[in-house]
Amino acid sequence: MTPEKKNQRRLRNLALLSLLLLLVGGTFAFQAFNQRAINDRIRENIPGGRVHDYYNRDTENKDVFVENYGNVPLMARIRLSEFMEKRSVGDTDFTPIVNGTIRDQVDTWTVMRPSENNLNIRVDDSAAFNTYSNLTFGWSRSGQDAPWFMPTFNRDNQDLMTAAAGHARDWVTSTATDGVTDGATHPGDGTDAYWSSGDSFDNSGPVWPGEEVTHDAAQNLQQERAPMTISQWAALPNNLKVGNFWVIDHQTGWAYWANQLQAGETTSYLLDAAEMTAAVNTIPGEYYYGIHVDGQLISPDRINDFLAADGSFTHHDDLSDFLTAVQTGSIDNNWGNPGPDDNVQPDQINFSIMAPGTIFTMAGEQYRYLENQGGGNHLIIRNDSLRGHLPAAQETALTNWYAGLDSAVQAMVQPVANVFTTAHVRPYDLDWSDPARWQVLNLDDFPDIAADISTAVSTGTPRAFALSMADIVRLSGAGLAFTSNENRAGIGSSWWFLRTRSSETGSGIWRVGSGGGLGAWSSQHPSLDTGGVRPALIVRQ
């Protein structure tokens, strides 16, 4: 039995942005005066997330993860609680294996708390379950991509119902604890790999709570590393501390997603199976075992909610640093370097200890640190694009922006090639890692493209420049400057041009889209108000 509940009441402080209205005035014969246009936007930021629990008591498969179906980022945590009781043949009453716990009162169930260095060994009261139950954390299959799931049909962000499939039981719809009563709210039988690519489900009726629509199966995020305790997290290199994986505070039992969960994303599995050990076969009678799943989601500006007092539990000392790292997208690994919004001069920054992806503000401009190129040289890029420029105006925009930089910054800038060899490659000639075009798989088939790497050249000119496709490919991935499609885009999901061309002639040029994927300008024409030129620099310190 796996009752669940979820708390979404803390999703607050929704912001209004602009979206979607075009009014154009008319013209008159032989005259065209007072023509007017309005390009307005109004968009409501709607947070929404759902905890998924797919469980099958026959196979002992149990998949627990979180889906963000809204249009703004979320931060997520989940806590598991366990209960077990036994009754010998001839006895009337069950006896719980942890004193004071009661089957029908899930708030008395025992919070699953692992040891500091091993998730598979429970401690304190939770240790009583080591004998009888094995929990499998994370999802890993050799040679396989991330698993598939069916997105929730329930898009009401005030509804605390979970997406419970198979023998899982949503706590809102069914508080029964008899191990038999049905409480599913979502399609599927809870077995491993029930959904796969190409599957769909028509919820007309509705069959399950939510909208009467058809959804296609979607893919969970691939876990970048196995779930770990927060002490193990603290020992990671700082440039690996934010990413797509779960971190469990072993002192409270809360498991945190170590990244902002972007709109449309779904976490990897926190739990993949809950299997009873051979020891249960020696119980001379009956036993009952259940797991309770408590999921909580917040907007990234509400991290203090996750730091609030938690009953008799004490948050780990590193939790504040962890949550701040997730909130900002990087960990302060700089031993006194300024924060992302602290406007400082170059001599107040130590680039040599910056992690890829670190955001910093220098002399009035905010940048993302990309890589240490050795020899004191560091590749950085403006954290937002310069909007309003067509491809033909890219070099002019770069030159003008560089001319306006603080003189102390210009003094650090290293020369690069006066002219880059910008070969062209067409979109349909490339093999992509996924439909969102995160990575090019066959870039080496185009040696001129692959060789176009941004480096300092002593015979060149100190200047700003656009990155190449080869730069994007090598700077994207776990522990690198860009760890997801979302953080490849500029501020506000702004798109930006590369210098690599997508056609031999004309205006064809590659760009990083608002969603972070690679696309060709010649075949996609986004508004110039939402993106443009993103200057990069090589600085020496």
Image (cartoon, rainbow, N blue to C red):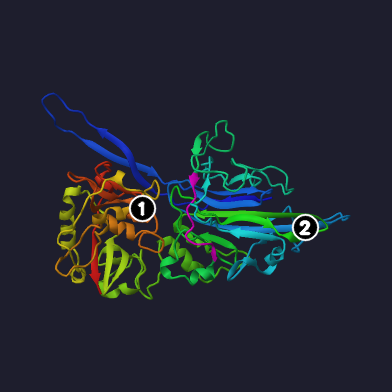
Q: Secondary structure at mark 2?
A: helix
Q: List x then y, in percent, for residue 143.
A: 49, 55
Residue type at tag 1: Leu
Q: Position of residue 65 (x, y in %)?
A: 55, 52
User: Measured along the vertical axis of the image, is residue 185 above or below residue 285?
Assistant: above
* Residue 420 can be seen, yes or no: yes
Q: Quadrant of residue 521?
A: top left
Reply yes or no: does residue 227 show up in magenta.
yes
Q: CA distance from mark 2 to mark 1?
A: 50 Å
Query: What residue is shown with label 1?
Result: 441
Instruction: Please say whether residue 384 is visible from this viewpoint.
Output: no
> For the stretch drawn in magenta, what is the main secondary structure?
loop
Q: Which residues are magenta?
A: 218-228
Q: Which residue is mark 2?
A: 281
Q: Between residue 399 and residue 101, name the one nearer to us.
A: 399
Q: Secondary structure at mark 1?
A: loop
Q: Do the residues bearing badges 2 and 1 touch, measured as CB atoms within 8 Å?
A: no
**Labels 2 and 1: the sequence-earlier one:** 2
Which residue is the extreme one toward the top? Answer: 29
Instruction: Tell me if residue 484 comes above or below residue 372 in the rendering.
Output: above
Q: Is residue 316 left or right of residue 98?
A: left
